[in-house]
Image: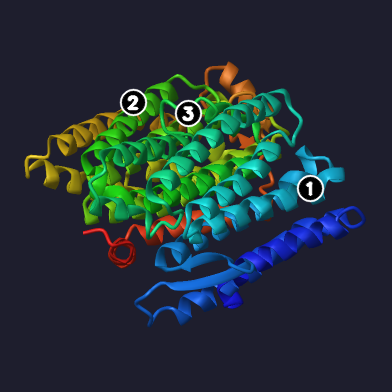
Amino acid sequence: MLDLILPEIVIAVAAILILLTGFKFKKISGYIALLGIVASLISLFVIAIQSINTTADSIAVITIAEGISIFYNVGLLAVVFKFIFLIVGLMAVIASLKYTEKFISDKIFDAYYALILFAILGMLVVASAADLLTLFVGLEMAAIPAYVLVAIEKTKKGIEGAAKYFLFGAVFSAILLFGISLIYFSTGSLMLDQSGILHQGGDENLKLLTFIGILAIVLGLAYEMSAAPFHFWAPDAYQGAPSPVSALLAGASKKMAFVALLKILVVFIVLFKFELSVMLAILAILSMFVGNVLALAQKDVRKMLAYSSIAQVGYILAAIAIFTPLGIAYAIYYIIVHAFMKGGAFIAAGTLLFVSDGKIKNYDDYKGLWRTAPITAFAMAAFMLSLAGIVPFGGFTAKILILVELFVQAMQENMLALILGVVMIITSVISLYYYGRLIKYMWFVEPEGMEHKSDEHGEHNEHNKNNGHNEHIEVKFEKFKEPIAFVIPMLIAVIALLILFYAPPFVEICTNIVHSLGVS
């Protein structure tokens, strides 16, 4: 059954190979990481093809010692999200090939790429985890490299963001582990498919312990996905981290937390449907308001994207909170779309940091970007339109589907769905301001302070202008050279969002995932 864990094996081997050779051949570390992810994608594609005609999930049994085995689920949920993790990881590594030349010391190239691969490995483990202990190990395997990656540029903001991420992460990891221990005590099992058997009995004390355990796990995962009010680490971490790392965190790490959440919820939904629904709805409402309102006040574009990401978490949680098969399916669809929106947006922001030597950071620096960096301006506009829910990008379809399902449930006298739908509309309207403002600055406001030169008749034209003749002066702005290493991942994300605009085939896949999870 080792073929079912081949993607993880390939990533692990590539990471170890980088550590073994990187000290001598540092510049090839990025290409080893790139090849490792591509090989892992190919092996995952083979697994996906083989499982098309199989209705049941494939299970790999890994024996560690006599009597100790790990069950590894490679079902549709795992395969789809592994593709997302690997593709976002691929985008981050491609962008890093150029980004590292200017902002990261070549002495730590090997550590940088190895940490990215180990973080991706942790995400892959979470996607296939069939028990709570493996789930926890995968979460930590993804989080610990991320703590280091956030501070790897050794800037003040990066170190501050990493410190917050690490310190609070340690606390919430302990809370998560505490919740797992309570569930094990109350149910007698760590296996996800067996933990929900408590509803067959009537012990109220054990039921209370189980609920406290689930509450602790949800709090731990809410921190990982940066849902309000557990979002305090995200803005500083995303702003201070290298932009490819921010893309990986926003585009993949958050999705890992949602996968873990879905695995937990589908098991205990029978026991605590109302309580879990209210809990997630509160997180969703807080995230939508906090993320969008605080994003309005930001001047730094990467910090705006961080707060925007918190708001997007709220939209996804709103769809999950109503606990309908379509609601969860649309949430999964939104997660997939969001991976490309946010991953691409952070890479676009990193492109501008690279070409301007770190000068293009704030809204004002984005003025007239269509003249100076047209490809990046086009890509960033596409990401902003998709995040705002504007056609013809996947963000529009995903947001509309969630809103439709919320109001369908509201018409069936589900007051919680009505509240979530109204809040989602209000906060989406708020978000139009800061997304639209960035597009306005890039495309409709002329740049200030850019080097320019008049045409060969410039002096003559200026003389005529002084004499009252209003003649046109052609102004040529100095264009930045946009490296192909940044253009490729941005185009991947834009093309993906255009394809995802047509929802039916992807919604069908998401619906099949929900059915495989047993949600009815």
- CA gap, disc 3 and disc 1: 28 Å
Q: Residue at x 86, y 55 (%)?
A: 22
Image height check: is 413 above or below 499? above
Occupied quadrant, residue 205: top left
Image height check: is 285 above or below 69? above
- CA gap, disc 1 and disc 2: 38 Å
State the residue position of label 1. 111
Of residue 46 and residue 142, the one placed in the foreground of this image is 142
Occupied quadrant, residue 419: top left
Label 2 amino acid? Phe
Q: Nearer the viewer, mark 3 or mark 2?
A: 3
The reply, left or right, for residue 513 in relation to residue 2 is left
Mark 3 / mark 1, whichever is N-terminal: 1
Location of residue 357 in the rendering, given as x and y in whole percent from the top left corner: 73, 34
Label 3 amino acid? His
- CA gap, disc 3 and disc 2: 12 Å
Of residue 386 and residue 64, the one placed in the foreground of this image is 64
State the residue position of label 3. 231
Count every numbered label the image shows and give the total.
3
Q: Nearer the viewer, mark 1 or mark 2?
A: 1
Give the secondary structure at mark 3.
loop
State the residue position of label 2. 289
Q: Residue at x 92, y 56 (%)?
A: 24
Label 1 amino acid? Ala
Is residue 505 at all visible to an observer of this figure?
Answer: yes
Location of residue 30 in the rendering, given as x and y in whole percent from the top left corner: 75, 56
Occupied quadrant, residue 437: top left
Image height check: is 234 above or below 113? above
